[in-house]
Each structure stands twice: as structure tokens, then as C-alpha cells.
Amino acid sequence: MQIKALNNLAEQAQYSFLTDSYASGVGTVGLKNINAFPADYALQLGKTGEEQTEIKLIDSVSGSNLILGAVTTYEHPVDTPVYAIKFNQIIFKKSASGTAGTATAITSGTVSITPDSQVTVFDDGAGLTTDAYRTCYYNSSTGDTSVDSDWLTPSGFSFYSLAKMKERVKNKLYSAGYLKADDTQVSDWINEWQERMNNAAIEVNQDYSIGSTSIAHGTSGLGTIADSDFKEIRRIWFTTNGSDYFQARKIHMTDVYPGEVYADTNPYYYMMGDNVFCKAPSGNSGTVSILYYKLQEPLSSDTDQLPVSMWGYTKSFVDYGLSQAYFLDDKLDQGKIFLTSASSELERFKQEMTPRSKTGPTFIKKTEEITADDPFYFI
């Protein structure tokens, strides 16, 4: 079972450049700026994926020179980028209980990073299709480790997962000869677009992305909605006995006057800030049942998936990510092309998300009889 870990440490690492050209087999290299390269750190000579890129540990620092723990394997020209990546190895961990278990380090599963490739591969000969894996980076000199990665499974990531959409964006940037955007930026762009898609769905379908909660309130009628994904109330019912519920109508807090009489069987409510409601009438404690518009949960783990309603529109996420990457690189024309494509997919999403009851012919409800005496009566 081959498990692959992305070699992406250089994407967010500080970097400098070689001051001279160096032949293979040298133990000291000079950098234009050594501030980010302390002793015992690992450095990467060259860009990830290039043929002669390699990783070495720093033994010590002398002036603007770095004394390496081992001599270089390849020659490197002047101005070769050098990255302070800190770690030189990857620890592969496995759970025999899938993603529900705990991943522990595999015997002989600590391997050196292969920076001349986009991935480091570990072959787990005892691996099963039901296993799940995590990885972490490791510095063999200091013993420092990074946090564990998201889960890796033999079947790979779902087509609708954050990892797969990031991969699609990055692959197109690779083929375009451009790669300034890192994983974090691409994830942020995907979540930006998810927010826009979610808001577009709510715009055409008021029953989309609904959450529910029940909250007890005291005799003051005040209650706080503490759900982290709460956005706005859709419907609210009050009960004072736990069995009889009455739907409340919304009013503004300025519409409530001293001495005004309300009934528990015909309640009203108003908002005091973003998530605090107040029932009218007050005086009786009770419980409120609320349906509310939800904030869309950001995709954070690589295994996180889009809401099912967005599964048919992954191209819009990729196109939006590409547009932001090109804008970041001042390639405005290319950025506009991909943004237009993403916006077109958004309009298609809105159209197809609109409930069928809202499409087709629209009829005006007649509220009173029309007679021949009516000035707007025509034969």
C-alpha cells in the first residue's frame, strides 16, 4: 500500500538565495540573508519538484555562511532559492480502525523527505484498504515534530473534498507555470466561494441551510441563541407548559410600549442585538423552539466535503480559486476569464436551486369579485 504525503513545507517557509555557485560535495554554503536559518534547522536547496533539489541539516552558522551536517549531493548555481523548512523527515502513522481510530507511528515508517518530487512516498507492505493514515514532519537532529496531518485513506480523497479541489486548483497553476498561492490561500478562496454559494441558495430558497435549537428563557422573556452557526431567525415558537406551542410574530423593539398587553397564546418577539431575543409578553418562563438560517461551516480538514447541494458545481470553486491566484499575480485578463466562468456557474446554481413552485407561470390571487361596474372591467 503506497501512501503519499505532499512536500509543501517550502510553500510557507522563509527563504533566501545562494551567494555563489557551488559544486556537489561542499559542506558550507553562503546565503544572502541567513536570519531565518538557525542551527539544527533543515534547509531545502532548490524548488520542490526540481531534479537536483535536496534537503540538508544546518550544523552551525558562521557569518553569512551555513555549515551543513552533510555535504551536498548536487551542484547548485548562484541565486538558487534556499528554504528554511525546519524538518527533514516524515513520520507515517497508521490506524487499523480507519479514521475512527488513533494513528500510531509505523515501524520503519520514518523516511527522509524527497524534495525533488511533489510527494514523499511510503510503501506499507502490511497495509489494508480499511486502514487510515496520518503523517507529521520530523527533525532528526532536534527531535521536533509538527502537528499530524489530516487523515489519508487508500481510496484517496472524495471528489467533493477540500483536498481534491485544492489539488485541482494547484494542478492548473502548475501547468500554467505559476505557483505563488499556497494551500492556506487556496483553502481561503474555496471557503469564500462556499459562502457566496450558500448566500445565493438562501436568496432563492428561504428553506435552505436551516438549523434548529431549543432555548429556555426566564420570566424576563430574554434568551440568548448560543449556536455558533446561527445567522438569523427563520421561525420561532414559544411554550410555557412544554406541550402547547404558539408561533411568534416579529416586531421591532421600538414597537413595544409600557403598559401594552400581550397574550401567551399570541406572542411576539423582538431582537436585542445579534443573538438575543425578547418575548412579549414577559412574566412567564418557558421554552422557545427556533428554526434559523445557518452560517456555512468552513471547510478546514482536507477530508471535509461540500454540502451535497453544491456537489454538481465544483468547477465554480476551482475557477474562483484560479481567478484569485491570477489576480494575486497581476494577471488581470486571465483572472477575469475564470471569475466570469465561476459567476456563470453561480447563476446556474441559483436557477437550479430555485424551488419548482417558484418557477413557471405566476398567478395573481383574486381578493374580491370584479363586476361590470368596475372601471377596470373589460369584455
Image: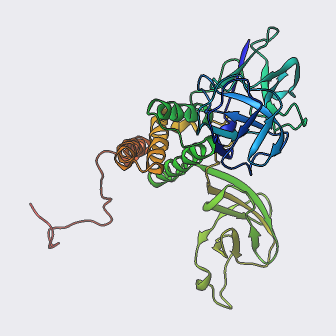
Q: Position of residue 295 (x, y in %)?
A: 62, 54
Quarter of the image for the N terminus: give it.
Answer: top right
Count of marks overlaid on the render: 0
Q: Residue furthest bottom?
A: 258
Q: Position of residue 50 (x, y in %)?
A: 58, 26
State the image quarter where residue 337 is shown: top left
Residue drawn at (62%, 24%), measured in percent from left and top? 52
Q: Position of residue 119 (x, y in %)?
A: 66, 24
Q: Is residue 135 left or right of residue 171?
A: right
Image height check: is 263 above or below 260? Answer: above
Residue drawn at (63%, 67%), measured in percent from left and top? 248
Q: Position of residue 239 (x, y in %)?
A: 74, 64
Image height check: is 256 above or below 38? Answer: below
- Colour scheme of the rendered structure: rainbow
Quarter of the image for the C terminus: give it.
Answer: bottom left
State the image quarter where residue 45 is shown: top right
Image height check: is 296 above or below 66? Answer: below
Residue drawn at (44%, 51%), measured in percent from left and top? 204
Report whether residue 96 is seen.
no
Q: Is residue 183 left or right of residue 316?
A: right
The foreground one among 55 and 205 is 55
Q: Is residue 184 left or right of residue 372?
A: right
Report whether residue 156 is seen.
yes
Q: Residue furthest left?
A: 379
Residue drawn at (62%, 26%), measured in percent from left and top? 118
State the image quarter where residue 149 is shown: top right
Q: Residue furthest top?
A: 125
The foreground one among 353 and 166 is 166
The foreground one among 73 and 345 is 73
